[in-house]
Amino acid sequence: MKQIILIYCFLHLHLSYGQYTQVPDPNFEQALIDLGIDDDGLNGQFLTTNAIGITTLNLDEKNINNLTGIEAFIDLEQLFASSNNLSSFDLSMVPSDLFTLGLNDNNLSDIDLSNVPQIVNLYLGSNNFTSIDASNLSSLFIFHLSNQNITNLNLTNCTSLASLRCVETSLNSIDLSECVNLTYFNARDSQITSLDFLNNPNIEEIEIQNTPLSNINLPNNPLLDYLSVSNTLLTELDISNCQSLVSLYFNDTNITQLNFSNNTNIEIISGNNSSLSSIDVTNNPNLSWLWLRNNNLTGIIDLSNNFVLDDVELNYNMLEEMDFSHNTDISFIRIDDNPNLQFVNMNNGSNEDLVAFIAIDCPELSCVVVDDTNAPNTNFIVDAHTTLVENIEDCDNLSVTKNKLRSLFNVFPNPVKGALRIKNNSTFQIESIEFYNLIGELVLSKTENLYFVDTSILKSGVYFLKIITGKGTLIEKVLKK
Protein backbone atom coordinates (compact mmCIF):
# COMPACT_ATOMS: atom_id res chain seq x y z
CA MET A 1 0.00 0.00 0.00
CA LYS A 2 2.83 2.39 0.89
CA GLN A 3 4.42 1.75 -2.50
CA ILE A 4 1.21 2.73 -4.29
CA ILE A 5 1.02 6.02 -2.36
CA LEU A 6 4.65 6.85 -3.11
CA ILE A 7 4.16 6.10 -6.81
CA TYR A 8 1.05 8.36 -6.88
CA CYS A 9 2.88 11.27 -5.22
CA PHE A 10 5.82 10.89 -7.58
CA LEU A 11 3.58 10.95 -10.63
CA HIS A 12 1.65 14.00 -9.30
CA LEU A 13 4.81 15.99 -8.68
CA HIS A 14 6.24 14.99 -12.04
CA LEU A 15 3.11 16.06 -13.88
CA SER A 16 2.93 19.39 -11.97
CA TYR A 17 6.52 20.16 -12.70
CA GLY A 18 6.05 19.55 -16.36
CA GLN A 19 2.88 21.65 -16.65
CA TYR A 20 2.94 24.82 -18.79
CA THR A 21 0.78 27.95 -18.73
CA GLN A 22 -0.28 29.45 -22.03
CA VAL A 23 0.55 33.12 -22.69
CA PRO A 24 -1.11 34.28 -25.95
CA ASP A 25 0.26 37.84 -25.72
CA PRO A 26 3.93 37.89 -26.84
CA ASN A 27 4.53 41.20 -25.06
CA PHE A 28 3.35 39.68 -21.79
CA GLU A 29 5.61 36.67 -22.33
CA GLN A 30 8.55 38.91 -23.23
CA ALA A 31 8.03 40.79 -19.97
CA LEU A 32 8.14 37.47 -18.10
CA ILE A 33 11.33 36.56 -19.97
CA ASP A 34 12.88 39.91 -19.00
CA LEU A 35 11.98 39.20 -15.38
CA GLY A 36 13.58 35.76 -15.53
CA ILE A 37 10.27 33.95 -14.98
CA ASP A 38 9.97 32.47 -18.47
CA ASP A 39 13.27 30.73 -19.17
CA ASP A 40 12.63 28.83 -22.40
CA GLY A 41 12.19 31.62 -24.94
CA LEU A 42 9.30 33.23 -26.73
CA ASN A 43 7.04 30.26 -27.50
CA GLY A 44 3.62 31.20 -26.10
CA GLN A 45 4.02 29.40 -22.78
CA PHE A 46 6.09 29.21 -19.62
CA LEU A 47 6.68 26.60 -16.95
CA THR A 48 3.89 26.98 -14.39
CA THR A 49 6.11 26.18 -11.42
CA ASN A 50 8.24 29.24 -12.26
CA ALA A 51 5.35 31.44 -11.11
CA ILE A 52 5.06 29.83 -7.69
CA GLY A 53 6.35 31.97 -4.83
CA ILE A 54 6.31 35.26 -6.78
CA THR A 55 4.47 37.89 -4.72
CA THR A 56 5.10 41.07 -6.74
CA LEU A 57 4.91 41.46 -10.50
CA ASN A 58 5.73 44.76 -12.25
CA LEU A 59 4.48 44.82 -15.84
CA ASP A 60 4.23 48.60 -16.31
CA GLU A 61 4.86 49.98 -19.83
CA LYS A 62 5.20 46.63 -21.62
CA ASN A 63 2.61 47.18 -24.41
CA ILE A 64 0.59 44.25 -23.08
CA ASN A 65 -2.86 43.63 -24.59
CA ASN A 66 -3.83 40.44 -22.77
CA LEU A 67 -2.95 39.17 -19.30
CA THR A 68 -4.07 35.59 -19.85
CA GLY A 69 -1.57 33.46 -17.95
CA ILE A 70 -1.63 35.61 -14.84
CA GLU A 71 -3.67 32.84 -13.16
CA ALA A 72 -0.45 30.83 -12.72
CA PHE A 73 0.84 33.33 -10.15
CA ILE A 74 -1.06 31.82 -7.24
CA ASP A 75 1.04 33.61 -4.60
CA LEU A 76 0.77 37.05 -6.18
CA GLU A 77 0.09 39.89 -3.73
CA GLN A 78 0.92 42.96 -5.84
CA LEU A 79 0.32 43.36 -9.58
CA PHE A 80 1.37 46.52 -11.44
CA ALA A 81 0.27 46.67 -15.08
CA SER A 82 -0.12 50.40 -15.76
CA SER A 83 0.59 52.10 -19.10
CA ASN A 84 -0.34 49.12 -21.27
CA ASN A 85 -3.04 48.44 -23.87
CA LEU A 86 -5.48 46.41 -21.81
CA SER A 87 -9.10 46.76 -22.93
CA SER A 88 -10.38 44.06 -20.58
CA PHE A 89 -9.16 42.14 -17.57
CA ASP A 90 -10.97 39.24 -15.90
CA LEU A 91 -10.14 39.64 -12.22
CA SER A 92 -11.33 36.11 -11.49
CA MET A 93 -7.86 35.07 -12.75
CA VAL A 94 -6.00 36.77 -9.89
CA PRO A 95 -5.35 34.97 -6.60
CA SER A 96 -7.24 35.66 -3.39
CA ASP A 97 -4.09 37.05 -1.73
CA LEU A 98 -3.76 39.94 -4.19
CA PHE A 99 -4.05 43.21 -2.24
CA THR A 100 -2.51 45.80 -4.63
CA LEU A 101 -3.62 46.24 -8.24
CA GLY A 102 -2.31 48.97 -10.53
CA LEU A 103 -4.05 49.39 -13.89
CA ASN A 104 -3.57 53.11 -14.60
CA ASP A 105 -3.33 54.34 -18.18
CA ASN A 106 -4.94 51.47 -20.10
CA ASN A 107 -8.02 51.21 -22.33
CA LEU A 108 -10.35 49.63 -19.79
CA SER A 109 -14.02 50.63 -19.98
CA ASP A 110 -15.52 48.03 -17.65
CA ILE A 111 -14.27 46.06 -14.68
CA ASP A 112 -15.92 43.58 -12.30
CA LEU A 113 -14.52 44.18 -8.83
CA SER A 114 -16.72 41.57 -7.16
CA ASN A 115 -13.94 39.02 -7.66
CA VAL A 116 -11.42 40.92 -5.53
CA PRO A 117 -13.16 41.71 -2.22
CA GLN A 118 -9.79 41.48 -0.49
CA ILE A 119 -8.17 44.32 -2.51
CA VAL A 120 -6.53 47.05 -0.42
CA ASN A 121 -4.86 49.38 -2.94
CA LEU A 122 -6.53 49.98 -6.31
CA TYR A 123 -5.28 52.28 -9.09
CA LEU A 124 -7.57 52.69 -12.12
CA GLY A 125 -6.70 56.18 -13.37
CA SER A 126 -6.58 57.26 -17.03
CA ASN A 127 -8.93 54.62 -18.43
CA ASN A 128 -12.33 54.80 -20.15
CA PHE A 129 -14.67 53.99 -17.27
CA THR A 130 -18.02 55.74 -17.03
CA SER A 131 -19.18 53.81 -13.97
CA ILE A 132 -17.42 51.84 -11.23
CA ASP A 133 -19.05 49.71 -8.54
CA ALA A 134 -16.71 49.29 -5.57
CA SER A 135 -19.50 48.45 -3.14
CA ASN A 136 -18.07 45.11 -2.02
CA LEU A 137 -14.54 46.35 -1.28
CA SER A 138 -14.70 46.61 2.49
CA SER A 139 -10.88 46.28 2.75
CA LEU A 140 -10.14 48.99 0.18
CA PHE A 141 -7.69 51.52 1.67
CA ILE A 142 -6.36 53.53 -1.31
CA PHE A 143 -8.44 54.15 -4.45
CA HIS A 144 -7.23 56.32 -7.33
CA LEU A 145 -9.30 56.67 -10.53
CA SER A 146 -8.44 60.06 -12.02
CA ASN A 147 -8.42 61.37 -15.60
CA GLN A 148 -11.50 59.82 -17.18
CA ASN A 149 -15.18 60.47 -17.95
CA ILE A 150 -16.58 58.50 -15.05
CA THR A 151 -20.00 59.80 -13.93
CA ASN A 152 -20.98 57.19 -11.34
CA LEU A 153 -18.99 55.80 -8.41
CA ASN A 154 -20.48 53.47 -5.81
CA LEU A 155 -18.53 53.44 -2.54
CA THR A 156 -21.12 51.68 -0.39
CA ASN A 157 -19.49 49.51 2.31
CA CYS A 158 -16.04 51.03 1.69
CA THR A 159 -15.57 51.47 5.42
CA SER A 160 -11.77 51.08 5.32
CA LEU A 161 -11.17 53.61 2.55
CA ALA A 162 -8.60 56.20 3.67
CA SER A 163 -7.41 57.83 0.43
CA LEU A 164 -9.67 58.67 -2.53
CA ARG A 165 -8.34 60.47 -5.60
CA CYS A 166 -10.79 61.14 -8.43
CA VAL A 167 -9.14 64.10 -10.16
CA GLU A 168 -10.23 65.30 -13.62
CA THR A 169 -13.39 63.23 -13.89
CA SER A 170 -17.00 63.90 -14.91
CA LEU A 171 -18.39 63.09 -11.47
CA ASN A 172 -21.05 65.61 -10.45
CA SER A 173 -21.84 63.98 -7.11
CA ILE A 174 -20.33 61.47 -4.73
CA ASP A 175 -21.61 59.79 -1.55
CA LEU A 176 -18.91 59.50 1.11
CA SER A 177 -21.23 58.66 3.99
CA GLU A 178 -19.94 55.10 4.42
CA CYS A 179 -16.27 56.02 4.04
CA VAL A 180 -16.00 56.60 7.77
CA ASN A 181 -12.18 56.29 7.87
CA LEU A 182 -11.46 58.61 4.95
CA THR A 183 -8.42 60.85 5.59
CA TYR A 184 -7.60 62.17 2.09
CA PHE A 185 -10.03 63.31 -0.62
CA ASN A 186 -9.07 64.92 -3.93
CA ALA A 187 -11.66 65.62 -6.63
CA ARG A 188 -10.22 68.74 -8.23
CA ASP A 189 -11.18 69.50 -11.83
CA SER A 190 -14.37 67.46 -11.57
CA GLN A 191 -18.04 68.48 -11.90
CA ILE A 192 -19.00 68.00 -8.25
CA THR A 193 -21.44 70.64 -6.98
CA SER A 194 -21.98 69.57 -3.37
CA LEU A 195 -20.03 67.66 -0.71
CA ASP A 196 -20.99 66.40 2.74
CA PHE A 197 -18.30 65.26 5.19
CA LEU A 198 -20.70 64.62 8.06
CA ASN A 199 -19.61 60.98 8.45
CA ASN A 200 -15.91 61.57 7.86
CA PRO A 201 -14.51 62.66 11.24
CA ASN A 202 -10.99 61.49 10.34
CA ILE A 203 -10.60 63.54 7.17
CA GLU A 204 -7.29 65.43 7.12
CA GLU A 205 -6.95 66.79 3.58
CA ILE A 206 -9.56 67.97 1.05
CA GLU A 207 -8.82 69.27 -2.45
CA ILE A 208 -11.85 70.28 -4.52
CA GLN A 209 -10.54 73.26 -6.50
CA ASN A 210 -11.56 74.06 -10.08
CA THR A 211 -15.08 72.65 -9.76
CA PRO A 212 -18.65 74.09 -9.76
CA LEU A 213 -18.86 73.34 -6.03
CA SER A 214 -21.49 75.57 -4.40
CA ASN A 215 -21.94 73.78 -1.07
CA ILE A 216 -19.63 71.96 1.33
CA ASN A 217 -20.59 70.66 4.76
CA LEU A 218 -17.83 70.36 7.39
CA PRO A 219 -19.78 69.84 10.62
CA ASN A 220 -17.47 67.49 12.50
CA ASN A 221 -13.97 67.42 11.09
CA PRO A 222 -11.57 68.20 13.94
CA LEU A 223 -8.55 66.61 12.18
CA LEU A 224 -8.83 68.52 8.89
CA ASP A 225 -5.56 70.42 8.37
CA TYR A 226 -5.59 71.20 4.63
CA LEU A 227 -8.53 72.57 2.64
CA SER A 228 -8.48 73.88 -0.92
CA VAL A 229 -11.73 75.13 -2.45
CA SER A 230 -10.19 77.60 -4.91
CA ASN A 231 -11.95 78.46 -8.15
CA THR A 232 -15.34 77.17 -7.05
CA LEU A 233 -18.81 78.73 -6.80
CA LEU A 234 -18.79 78.92 -3.01
CA THR A 235 -20.24 82.05 -1.43
CA GLU A 236 -19.89 80.87 2.17
CA LEU A 237 -17.69 78.49 4.11
CA ASP A 238 -18.03 77.33 7.72
CA ILE A 239 -14.72 76.09 9.17
CA SER A 240 -15.63 76.54 12.83
CA ASN A 241 -15.50 72.77 13.44
CA CYS A 242 -12.10 72.34 11.80
CA GLN A 243 -9.93 73.06 14.81
CA SER A 244 -6.76 71.52 13.33
CA LEU A 245 -6.88 73.51 10.10
CA VAL A 246 -3.40 74.67 9.06
CA SER A 247 -3.80 75.66 5.40
CA LEU A 248 -6.86 77.19 3.72
CA TYR A 249 -7.03 78.10 0.03
CA PHE A 250 -10.19 79.78 -1.30
CA ASN A 251 -8.79 81.80 -4.21
CA ASP A 252 -11.19 82.88 -6.95
CA THR A 253 -14.42 82.37 -5.03
CA ASN A 254 -17.32 84.62 -4.01
CA ILE A 255 -16.89 84.01 -0.29
CA THR A 256 -17.79 87.24 1.53
CA GLN A 257 -16.94 86.37 5.13
CA LEU A 258 -15.00 83.81 7.17
CA ASN A 259 -14.76 83.16 10.89
CA PHE A 260 -11.29 82.06 11.97
CA SER A 261 -11.86 82.28 15.72
CA ASN A 262 -11.71 78.48 16.23
CA ASN A 263 -8.77 77.93 13.90
CA THR A 264 -5.92 78.70 16.26
CA ASN A 265 -3.49 76.43 14.37
CA ILE A 266 -3.93 78.03 10.97
CA GLU A 267 -0.70 79.06 9.23
CA ILE A 268 -1.75 79.83 5.65
CA ILE A 269 -4.77 81.87 4.52
CA SER A 270 -4.95 82.30 0.76
CA GLY A 271 -8.05 83.92 -0.72
CA ASN A 272 -6.91 86.01 -3.66
CA ASN A 273 -9.56 87.32 -6.06
CA SER A 274 -12.42 86.69 -3.65
CA SER A 275 -15.04 88.91 -2.00
CA LEU A 276 -14.01 89.37 1.63
CA SER A 277 -14.84 92.80 3.05
CA SER A 278 -13.16 92.20 6.41
CA ILE A 279 -11.07 89.63 8.25
CA ASP A 280 -10.27 88.99 11.92
CA VAL A 281 -7.05 87.05 12.58
CA THR A 282 -6.50 88.12 16.18
CA ASN A 283 -7.04 84.54 17.39
CA ASN A 284 -4.56 83.00 14.95
CA PRO A 285 -1.10 83.29 16.55
CA ASN A 286 0.50 80.77 14.15
CA LEU A 287 -0.47 82.65 10.99
CA SER A 288 2.51 82.85 8.64
CA TRP A 289 1.09 83.68 5.19
CA LEU A 290 -1.82 86.04 4.58
CA TRP A 291 -2.67 86.33 0.89
CA LEU A 292 -5.85 88.28 0.12
CA ARG A 293 -5.10 90.14 -3.08
CA ASN A 294 -7.99 91.75 -4.92
CA ASN A 295 -10.76 91.46 -2.35
CA ASN A 296 -13.05 94.15 -0.91
CA LEU A 297 -11.13 94.67 2.33
CA THR A 298 -11.63 98.06 3.97
CA GLY A 299 -10.53 99.84 7.13
CA ILE A 300 -7.82 98.25 9.27
CA ILE A 301 -6.65 94.64 9.74
CA ASP A 302 -5.38 93.96 13.26
CA LEU A 303 -2.13 91.96 13.03
CA SER A 304 -0.92 92.65 16.57
CA ASN A 305 -1.24 88.99 17.66
CA ASN A 306 0.39 87.46 14.59
CA PHE A 307 3.97 87.39 15.80
CA VAL A 308 5.26 84.81 13.28
CA LEU A 309 3.67 86.44 10.24
CA ASP A 310 6.12 86.18 7.34
CA ASP A 311 4.38 86.98 4.04
CA VAL A 312 1.50 89.44 3.52
CA GLU A 313 -0.12 90.24 0.18
CA LEU A 314 -3.08 92.61 0.47
CA ASN A 315 -2.75 94.59 -2.74
CA TYR A 316 -5.81 95.68 -4.73
CA ASN A 317 -8.05 96.37 -1.74
CA MET A 318 -9.51 99.46 -0.03
CA LEU A 319 -7.52 99.37 3.22
CA GLU A 320 -6.94 102.61 5.14
CA GLU A 321 -4.20 101.73 7.66
CA MET A 322 -1.70 98.91 8.27
CA ASP A 323 0.38 98.34 11.39
CA PHE A 324 3.24 95.82 11.17
CA SER A 325 5.04 97.00 14.31
CA HIS A 326 4.41 93.66 16.09
CA ASN A 327 5.40 91.46 13.16
CA THR A 328 9.14 91.06 13.68
CA ASP A 329 9.44 87.95 11.45
CA ILE A 330 7.85 89.52 8.40
CA SER A 331 9.91 89.34 5.20
CA PHE A 332 7.57 90.27 2.35
CA ILE A 333 4.71 92.80 2.12
CA ARG A 334 2.56 93.82 -0.85
CA ILE A 335 -0.05 96.48 -0.16
CA ASP A 336 0.12 98.30 -3.48
CA ASP A 337 -3.01 99.52 -5.25
CA ASN A 338 -4.87 100.46 -2.08
CA PRO A 339 -6.28 103.89 -3.06
CA ASN A 340 -7.55 104.64 0.47
CA LEU A 341 -4.37 103.66 2.32
CA GLN A 342 -3.19 106.61 4.43
CA PHE A 343 -0.81 105.22 7.06
CA VAL A 344 1.60 102.28 7.47
CA ASN A 345 3.69 101.53 10.55
CA MET A 346 6.74 99.41 9.71
CA ASN A 347 8.70 100.26 12.86
CA ASN A 348 9.23 96.67 14.06
CA GLY A 349 13.01 96.52 14.50
CA SER A 350 13.41 94.10 11.59
CA ASN A 351 13.45 96.32 8.51
CA GLU A 352 16.92 95.13 7.54
CA ASP A 353 15.57 91.55 7.19
CA LEU A 354 12.75 92.64 4.91
CA VAL A 355 13.01 91.26 1.37
CA ALA A 356 10.52 93.73 -0.07
CA PHE A 357 7.87 96.23 1.00
CA ILE A 358 5.73 97.30 -1.97
CA ALA A 359 3.22 100.12 -1.61
CA ILE A 360 3.03 101.82 -5.00
CA ASP A 361 -0.13 103.29 -6.48
CA CYS A 362 -1.39 104.37 -3.06
CA PRO A 363 -2.23 108.04 -3.72
CA GLU A 364 -3.28 108.83 -0.13
CA LEU A 365 -0.21 107.27 1.50
CA SER A 366 1.94 110.23 2.53
CA CYS A 367 4.34 108.39 4.81
CA VAL A 368 5.57 105.05 6.16
CA VAL A 369 7.10 104.78 9.64
CA VAL A 370 10.34 102.77 9.43
CA ASP A 371 13.13 101.75 11.81
CA ASP A 372 15.82 104.08 10.49
CA THR A 373 15.52 106.72 7.77
CA ASN A 374 19.33 106.83 7.50
CA ALA A 375 19.45 103.19 6.43
CA PRO A 376 19.50 102.45 2.68
CA ASN A 377 15.88 101.17 2.79
CA THR A 378 16.19 99.99 -0.82
CA ASN A 379 13.74 97.21 0.02
CA PHE A 380 10.97 99.82 0.39
CA ILE A 381 9.26 100.39 -2.97
CA VAL A 382 6.84 103.30 -2.60
CA ASP A 383 5.36 106.13 -4.65
CA ALA A 384 7.28 109.34 -5.17
CA HIS A 385 4.91 111.18 -2.84
CA THR A 386 5.36 108.70 0.03
CA THR A 387 7.95 109.68 2.64
CA LEU A 388 9.80 107.35 5.04
CA VAL A 389 9.83 108.72 8.60
CA GLU A 390 10.95 107.40 11.98
CA ASN A 391 8.00 108.26 14.19
CA ILE A 392 4.25 108.61 13.99
CA GLU A 393 4.35 112.31 14.89
CA ASP A 394 6.29 113.09 11.72
CA CYS A 395 3.66 111.22 9.77
CA ASP A 396 0.89 113.25 11.38
CA ASN A 397 2.66 116.51 10.53
CA LEU A 398 3.05 115.44 6.91
CA SER A 399 -0.63 114.64 6.73
CA VAL A 400 -1.64 118.04 8.12
CA THR A 401 0.65 119.87 5.70
CA LYS A 402 -0.69 117.83 2.81
CA ASN A 403 -4.32 118.65 3.62
CA LYS A 404 -3.53 122.35 4.01
CA LEU A 405 -1.64 122.53 0.72
CA ARG A 406 -4.42 120.70 -1.10
CA SER A 407 -6.84 123.45 -0.15
CA LEU A 408 -4.50 126.11 -1.57
CA PHE A 409 -3.74 124.66 -5.01
CA ASN A 410 -5.98 123.55 -7.87
CA VAL A 411 -4.75 121.27 -10.66
CA PHE A 412 -6.93 121.18 -13.79
CA PRO A 413 -8.13 119.72 -16.08
CA ASN A 414 -7.78 116.23 -14.68
CA PRO A 415 -7.87 113.95 -16.66
CA VAL A 416 -5.71 115.96 -19.03
CA LYS A 417 -4.88 115.58 -22.71
CA GLY A 418 -2.63 118.58 -23.41
CA ALA A 419 -2.05 121.60 -21.17
CA LEU A 420 -2.24 121.12 -17.39
CA ARG A 421 -2.70 124.24 -15.28
CA ILE A 422 -1.89 124.87 -11.64
CA LYS A 423 -3.77 127.62 -9.81
CA ASN A 424 -2.09 129.00 -6.67
CA ASN A 425 -4.59 130.38 -4.15
CA SER A 426 -1.93 131.25 -1.59
CA THR A 427 1.16 133.36 -1.10
CA PHE A 428 3.34 130.22 -1.10
CA GLN A 429 5.98 130.23 -3.79
CA ILE A 430 6.17 127.11 -5.99
CA GLU A 431 9.82 126.12 -6.28
CA SER A 432 9.51 123.23 -8.74
CA ILE A 433 7.15 120.61 -10.10
CA GLU A 434 7.88 116.95 -10.93
CA PHE A 435 6.01 114.12 -12.63
CA TYR A 436 6.54 110.48 -11.58
CA ASN A 437 5.16 107.31 -13.14
CA LEU A 438 3.59 104.45 -11.18
CA ILE A 439 6.92 102.80 -10.39
CA GLY A 440 8.37 106.02 -8.96
CA GLU A 441 10.50 107.10 -11.93
CA LEU A 442 10.90 110.85 -12.56
CA VAL A 443 9.65 111.50 -16.09
CA LEU A 444 9.29 115.31 -16.17
CA SER A 445 10.46 118.23 -14.05
CA LYS A 446 10.20 122.04 -14.26
CA THR A 447 11.67 124.96 -12.35
CA GLU A 448 10.28 127.72 -14.58
CA ASN A 449 6.81 128.68 -15.83
CA LEU A 450 5.43 126.52 -13.05
CA TYR A 451 1.72 127.19 -13.55
CA PHE A 452 1.53 125.53 -16.94
CA VAL A 453 2.66 122.04 -18.02
CA ASP A 454 2.56 120.62 -21.55
CA THR A 455 1.70 116.94 -20.98
CA SER A 456 1.73 116.01 -24.67
CA ILE A 457 5.19 114.50 -24.22
CA LEU A 458 3.81 112.03 -21.68
CA LYS A 459 2.33 108.66 -22.61
CA SER A 460 -1.24 107.90 -21.60
CA GLY A 461 -1.52 106.59 -18.05
CA VAL A 462 -1.47 107.54 -14.39
CA TYR A 463 1.14 109.93 -12.98
CA PHE A 464 1.89 111.64 -9.69
CA LEU A 465 2.45 115.40 -9.81
CA LYS A 466 4.70 116.68 -7.03
CA ILE A 467 4.29 120.43 -6.32
CA ILE A 468 7.22 121.57 -4.18
CA THR A 469 6.83 124.78 -2.14
CA GLY A 470 8.76 126.42 0.64
CA LYS A 471 6.03 125.31 3.05
CA GLY A 472 5.80 121.68 2.01
CA THR A 473 5.07 119.36 -0.88
CA LEU A 474 1.72 118.46 -2.42
CA ILE A 475 1.16 115.26 -4.41
CA GLU A 476 -1.69 115.02 -6.90
CA LYS A 477 -2.68 112.01 -8.99
CA VAL A 478 -3.04 112.95 -12.67
CA LEU A 479 -4.58 110.89 -15.43
CA LYS A 480 -3.05 111.55 -18.86
CA LYS A 481 -5.37 110.68 -21.76
Image (cartoon, rainbow, N blue to C red):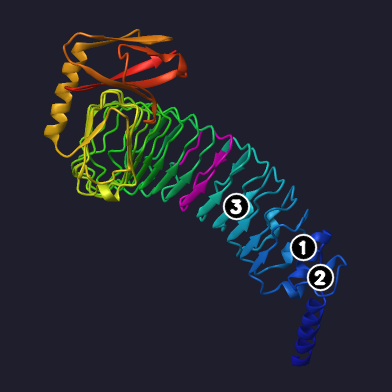
Q: Which residues are magenta?
A: 153-176
Badge 1: residue crowd in 10 Å (few <14, some 14–19, many ≥20):
many
Picture quadrant where residue 47 is located = bottom right
Which quadrant of the rendered structure holds the N terminus?
A: bottom right
121 relative to 263 in the view: left or right? right
The secondary element bearing badge 3 is classed as: strand
Residue 188, label in figure: none
- The quarter of the image holding the C terminus is top left
- For marks 3 and 1, the one nearer the N-term is 1
- Badge 3, how many Cα within 10 Å: few under 14, some, many 20+? many
Rendered view: 179 above or below 468: below
Q: Main secondary structure of the magenta part?
A: loop
Describe the element under mark 1 as helix, strand or loop: loop
Q: SS for tag 2?
A: strand
Q: Which residue is mark 1?
A: 69
Q: Is residue 333 visible?
A: no
Q: Is residue 117 or residue 3 the one in the foreground? A: 117
Q: In front here: 173 or 288?
A: 288
Question: Which kind of residue does numbered mark 2 sit on?
Answer: Phe
Is residue 330 depicted above or below 406 in this figure?
below
Circle 3 residue: 123
**Of residues 155 and 314, the one drawn nearer to the viewer in this rendering:** 314
